[in-house]
Image: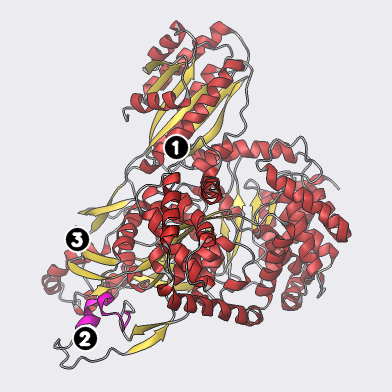
Amino acid sequence: MSDGATIWADSMIAAALAAIDPVVASVLLRAGAGPVREHWLDLVRELMPASTVIRKLPPSISDDRLLGGLDLAATLQSGCPVLQHGLLAEADGGVLIAVMAERIAPSTIAHLTAALDTGTVSIERDGMSLRVPSRFGLIALDEGIGDERVSPALADRLACHLDLGTVARADLGESLFKSSDIAAARALLPQIRLSDDAIAALTTTACALGIDSLRAPLLACRVARIAAALDGETDVAEPHIACAARLVLAPRATRLPAMEDDNESNEAPESQNESAESEQDDRSNDGPLEDRVLDAAQAAIPADLLKRLQDERAMRMRSSSASKQGTAQKAPKRGRPIGSRRGEWRAGARLNVLETLRAAAPWQPLRRRTQRSDKSGRLIVHKDDIRITRFKQRSGTTTIFVVDASGSSALQRLAEVKGAVELLLAECYIRRDEVALIAFRGKSAELLLPPTRSLTRAKRSLAALPGGGGTPLSAAIFAATELALAVKAKGQAPTIVLMTDGRANVARDGVGGRGEAEAEALVAARQLALTGIPVVLVDSSPRPQDKAAQLAGAMQARYVALPHADAARLSQAVMAQAGRG
Amino acid sequence: MGIAFPFSAIVGQDEMKLALMIAAVDPKVGGVLAFGDRGAGKSTAVRALAALLPPMSAVVGCPYQCDPADAAAQCAACRARSKPGGKAKKPAALKAHQVPVPVIDLPLGATEDRVVGALDLERALAHGEKSFEPGLLARANRGFLYIDEVNLLEDHLVDLLLDVAASGENVVERDGLSIRHPARIVLVGTGNPEEGELRPQLLDRFGLSVEVKTPGDLPTRIEVIKRRDAFETDQAAFVAHWDKEEAKHRKRILAAREHIGSVKVADRELEKTARLCMALGTDGLRGELTLMRAARAAAALDGAKAVDDSHLKTVAPMALQHRLRRNPLDDSGSSVRVERALNELFAS
């Protein structure tokens, strides 16, 4: 069987499990939109009872629609507040399909995870207070290309992770199961027994694969039960455990159990030791089942796990900026409400119902008289009465560091910048400022740290620093410009801090040539100047250079020579130069 | 929401459990913050707390569940009713009933009007009456206000909470209403630091802060999964199985509450408290106060007559670690610094 066919076979099982108990066997499906994904979704739909409510959750859903809120039309009609249920309540007992799940806004993710955790949705909005049951199965469709991924908080709660990226149309087959199998399994599910050994095997395997969250083994246990039910067994046996290990645990693996040495991507060495020890423990008492489950999981782990992990890490960093590019905000819709104003109620604006009704109230007798036909208690609201809530949101600053990581002296610089990033973060997070870091070397520029306010995350991302190679200055300037524009689109104010000696030697096409590379860097610099984004150029050469000053001129940057900076001086310089010191 | 996982069945996480118990014994310690790994059981512990707490006596029909025995902390309506010579001719004893201690969720999508309370829209529209509809702060009075993902809470809501948590009173001046009501609440927040930092002002308001880590050793992890699986398979049976343990915890909290007034804090321990805070350079006196209060509650939970070194040692990390000045270049983390200071203090 080809790789694709193997993956497809597992996907079929996942589809059946999701059809049996969608709430438990939720699915994260990574695949582009296309026939393969559609085929899978069709099969799930076919397997589920026909009565199942299946709703789509678009990534840009508003809180009103997601959680519920005041139904304006009905409220005006009846003269008293009427609640409109949100999607989370409507999906109770059914299935939600989150399309483009990698683009769901963080606040929406938080609501989704809260509903998944509690099985209810709490509404505390628009003068209403309600708890509505909301137990639904979730199928999250991750269409991310390369760098975009579903939020870790959501992925953690989804049981089966499938990646259909390598499945071709030729691999597709019909479902291995019929809806009668699903019905039988559903009936059997409450009687399934799961032994302590099975629990131990799955937990041990999760540990051995470097999976930290305890949700993973828990979900694996529950998936194993469903797998047994699908099989028509009342006891969870080895194949079911292996199946759960393949679908739930393997895709979450952060390392291969045998590879403890050349494992650079492991960020928590102590946990590695612990699990290594515990692995031995198990072997000493009762190994075989654990070993076989581990083998099963390992078989399902793609061979290029380590490489993928590294890519993923880079991806995760880029995603936080990329995923928001599309949501340019013209007027802030969140933040501190600062009263209301008369206005037109268009999409996105937040209607202030109380103020609107209050504006309409004094006119009611008069309006009723002019519209005599209307005898109901209906409120008559005119366009003039509409009040929109205004929000004030402090737009924070995002400082983007762009650092030359080529050659050995530059590494020193990079370390300084790392320190400066942490200092700035420690000082800035009160003001909601963010910091990002781009390093360039060899042939390209790489986003080491996406805009973040989290010191924890920054520390983790900055742990490993690449170094050496050529100086692709123009690529770096382009990357910085792109990121700065994305930041701006988000409503933040970007500042670029570029550290370089101005001596480029790699052009964007990746080939060397000092003259060409420098000319290209100047072009990039002029383009950056056109955007009007404030730039500080820190000349990092031991003696200030013409080239760097020239570059600063081209990008209309402030020029600072800091031949022997340390992290503290650098962060001071940035604060001062960015006009915040 | 269904049945909560029993508090006593939570494996490990002793620091978090102790912090919550301390807050249940002495609400004045000022709230609990649990920050840490995904899937480590933070929310489970907080939700379990609600089921654990012994019920309290409250005035019937009062939207703020006022304490009938504590006139000073009552809302205006309850005070007016109980005061002799007020509207009621006789000092009518307030009717009381037993209610569960509120553990109120503050969901992230909440709007300001629902948190502080606002004009009752329904009555305004239907009857033209201007009346106040109490919000979440009212519901949480004398209990806990739980914010999951507290670091994602919008700024303006955080500001509101800070003020109310500090004053114990909610002042509403909006929609033409002017109302104040008691809001003695214990803030409980959970979150994952990878989603973003918490504002330092808010961090400082939390009396106790614990770092929650997923248990690292395999047997513990297996035990967690076993219990969770047993719970999900048959919730009623599982809860019944843990009933005795829950009752024990409940008794311990009740006993500690009665007993806490008589727990002595010797000058010698106070001096150690002060020296510890000085060594760590915590700002203000809030660190000392919280440390002393938490140590006293811990002693009361132990049934001890006086605070001793062991209580100080147990609660010092949770009372102090979030009050240290941040030194981002020091990788050793604040809990390590507290530990170090503790060792130095008690070695001498």
Apparent side of residue B313 relative to residue B106 in the rendered image (left or right):
right
Instruction: Identify the subunit bearing mark 3.
Output: A
Residue stretch in magenta: B66-81
Q: Amino acid at mark 3?
A: Asp
For label 3, the crowd category at 10 Å Cα-Cα, with few meaning under 14, some 14 to 19 and many 20 or more, is many
Residue B207 seen anywhere in this rendered image of the structure: no
Report which quarter residue A66 is drawn in: bottom left
Kindly identify the residue that appears in the image at 52 percent across and 45 percent down: B337
Kindly identify the residue that appears in the image at 38 percent across and 66 percent down: B28
Kindly identify the residue that appears in the image at 54 percent across and 68 percent down: A118
Write down the residue under mark 3.
A385
Check if residue B99 falls in the magenta segment. Answer: no
Question: Marks 3 and 2: which is nearer the front?
Answer: 2
Report which quarter residue B268 is drawn in: bottom left
Q: Are marks 3 and 2 in contact (CB under 8 Å)?
A: no
Write down the residue under mark 2.
B81
Q: Amino acid at mark 2?
A: Arg
For label 1, the crowd category at 10 Å Cα-Cα, with few meaning under 14, some 14 to 19 and many 20 or more, is many
At which x and y percent is residue B288? 40, 55
Q: Amino acid at mark 1?
A: Leu
Q: Quadrant of the C terminus of chain A?
A: top left
Q: CA distance from mark 1 to mark 2?
A: 54 Å
Kindly identify the residue that appears in the image at 83 percent across and 52 percent down: A280
Q: Secondary structure at mark 1?
A: helix
Check if residue B80 falls in the magenta segment. Answer: yes
Instruction: Identify the subunit bearing mark 2.
Output: B
Query: Which residue occupies the foreground of this view, B285 or B52?
Result: B285
